[in-house]
Amino acid sequence: MFEGQSQTEIEAIMKADPEFRQLYQKHKDLDKKVLDAELGVLPLDDNTLAQMKREKLAAKDRLTHLYEARHH
């Protein structure tokens, strides 16, 4: 996520905005768990996996909104 932006810029936003930092970490954690579940490393039922994917998408949407609000 935010591959097109500099890591320095993202880190500066995380320092300045606690909500952004918390959501960024939540998205990162969910991304790892979803990947582990899809690889079979983390056993999850389909409903739990689907819920995690929805939470991850919601976090990404909010992060994108927060990022864009800083640039407009």
Image (cartoon, helix red, strand yellow):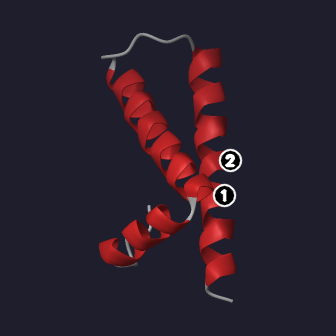
Q: Position of residue 49 (x, y in %)?
A: 56, 23
Q: Quadrant of residue 12?
A: bottom left
Do the CB atoms of the residues marked 2 and 1 lie less than 8 Å apart?
yes
Residue at the spot x=68%, y=57% of the render?
62
Q: In the figure, 55 relative to 59: above or below?
A: above
Q: Amino acid at mark 2?
A: Ala
| Residue on which disc 1 sits | 61
Q: 62 or 44, which is in the foreground?
A: 62
| Residue at disc 2, secondary structure | helix
State the image quarter where residue 48 is shown: top right
Q: CA distance from mark 2 to mark 1?
A: 5 Å
Image quadrant where one finds the C terminus: bottom right
From the viewer's perspective, is residue 1 above or below residue 24?
below
Dot 2: within a 10 Å radius of its alpha carbon, few (fewer than 14), some, or many (20 or more) residues? Answer: some
Residue 32 location, quadrant: top left
Establish if 46 lies above or below 25.
above
- In x, y percent, where is residue 26? 51, 40
Residue on which disc 2 sits:
58
Q: Residue furthest bottom?
A: 72
Q: Is residue 19 above or below residue 34?
A: below
Q: Nearer the viewer, residue 46 or 14?
A: 14
Closer-to-camera residue (10/58): 10
Q: Position of residue 28 (x, y in %)?
A: 43, 44
* Quadrant housing the N terminus: bottom left
* Residue drawn 69% across the image and 68% down it: 65
Measuring 63% from the left and 80% from the top, which residue is drawn there? 70
Residue 40: x percent and y percent? 34, 17
Label 1: how many Cα within 10 Å (few below 14, some 14–19, many 20+)? few
Q: Which mark is residue 6?
A: none
SS at mark 1? helix
Q: Give the amino acid at mark 1.
A: Asp
